[in-house]
Image (cartoon, rainbow, N blue to C red):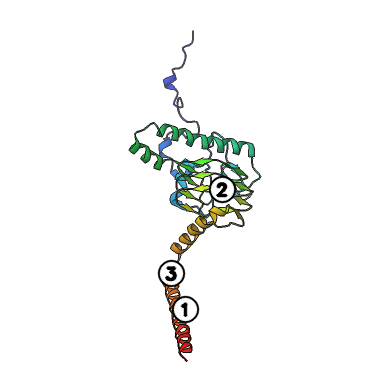
């Protein structure tokens, strides 16, 4: 009976067939190894934010594959820069993300008070750079930080009667249609330095608070020299006003005596 060849005698046994004989896989130069495609996120995203956003915001590829956009770049479903996307899946992943934060808040409430407050600061609704085909968060309660920084709302954004209990970030957000915040409540600081904000609907009670927020933000963002110039102009105008008032009063007094 012929004897079978020993598997140990086969030099290719257990080796990667794509690696040549005598070449170890770990010796392949890094630039020769094909990198897996990743979500581009946005052209203007800061380099130091990329990995954090991919980790905390992007839809994972095993949940939904990356999509090649007309610009030739690949995006996850959240960051695909068009409203022509799988809206049903988008809504599903968006609701899942909201529910995940809710579950986290419920667990946090079971902690001692000091630990609870610290844990709340580490938890957030993170939707940076997300391109929303639509959004309806009417009556929604944001109990922790809500970050919509640099997000794009391509159709009407409904936030009517929503409650924002912690810091809210809409900085550099783009509202391409109506943004409805009527009767929404902000009990903490909010950043609305939007890149594109054509129309916002709010209630009369919100006008004054929102105006203060916007004025405070824009005043803080002005360069120091411009701010100083503004203050000097204001002082000059007030001085001119009071001098004019004094002059009028003196003239009126002299007139009475005459």
Q: Position of residue 224 (x, y in %)?
A: 41, 68
Q: Which mark is residue 227?
A: 3
Q: Are marks 3 and 2 in contact (CB under 8 Å)?
A: no
The foreground one among 170 and 182 is 182
Q: Residue furthest right?
A: 84
Q: Is residue 219 left or right of residue 174?
A: left
The foreground one among 82 and 212 is 212
Distance CA(mark 3)–CA(mark 2): 33 Å
Distance CA(mark 1)–CA(mark 2): 39 Å
> Dot 3: within a 10 Å radius of its alpha carbon, few (fewer than 14), some, or many (20 or more) residues?
some
Q: Earlier in the sequence, mark 3 or mark 2?
A: 2
Q: How many marks?
A: 3
The foreground one among 190 and 84 is 190
The foreground one among 101 and 162 is 162
Secondary structure of the residue carrying numbered label 3: helix
Secondary structure of the residue carrying numbered label 2: loop
At horizontal 50% and vertical 52% (from top left) the residue drawn is 45
Q: Are marks 1 and 3 in contact (CB under 8 Å)?
A: no
Quadrant for residue 144, please give it. top left
Q: Is residue 91 visible?
A: yes
Q: Earlier in the sequence, mark 1 or mark 3?
A: 3
Q: Position of residue 231 (x, y in %)?
A: 42, 72
Residue under numbered circle 2? 183
Q: Which mark is residue 241?
A: 1
> Dot 1: within a 10 Å radius of its alpha carbon, few (fewer than 14), some, or many (20 or more) residues?
few
Q: Earlier in the sequence, mark 1 or mark 2?
A: 2
Q: Is residue 76 left or right of residue 6?
A: right
Secondary structure of the residue carrying numbered label 1: helix
């Amino acid at each position: 009976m012929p004897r079978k060849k020993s598997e140990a005698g086969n030099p290719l046994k257990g080796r990667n067939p794509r690696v040549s004989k005598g070449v170890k896989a770990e010796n392949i130069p890094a630039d020769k190894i094909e990198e897996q495609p990743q979500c581009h996120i946005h052209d203007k995203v800061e380099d130091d934010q990329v990995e954090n956003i991919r980790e905390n915001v992007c839809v994972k590829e095993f949940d939904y594959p990356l999509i090649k956009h007309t610009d030739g770049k690949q995006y996850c479903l959240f960051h695909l820069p068009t409203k022509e996307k799988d809206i049903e899946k988008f809504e599903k992943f968006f609701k899942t993300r909201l529910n995940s934060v809710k579950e986290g808040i419920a667990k946090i409430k079971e902690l001692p008070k000091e630990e609870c407050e610290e844990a709340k600061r580490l938890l957030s609704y993170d939707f940076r750079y997300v391109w929303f085909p639509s959004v309806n968060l009417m009556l929604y309660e944001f109990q922790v930080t809500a970050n919509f920084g640099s997000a794009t709302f391509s159709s009407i954004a409904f936030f009517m009667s929503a409650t924002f209990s912690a810091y809210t970030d809409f900085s550099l957000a783009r509202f391409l249609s109506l943004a409805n915040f009527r009767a929404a409540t902000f009990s903490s600081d909010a950043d609305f330095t939007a890149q594109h904000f054509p129309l916002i609907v709010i209630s009369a009670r919100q006008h004054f608070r929102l105006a203060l927020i916007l004025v405070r933000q824009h005043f803080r963002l002005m360069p120091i020299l411009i701010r100083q110039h503004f203050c000097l102009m204001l002082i000059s105008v007030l001085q001119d006003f009071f001098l004019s008032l004094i002059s009028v009063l003196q003239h009126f007094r002299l007139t009475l005596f005459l």
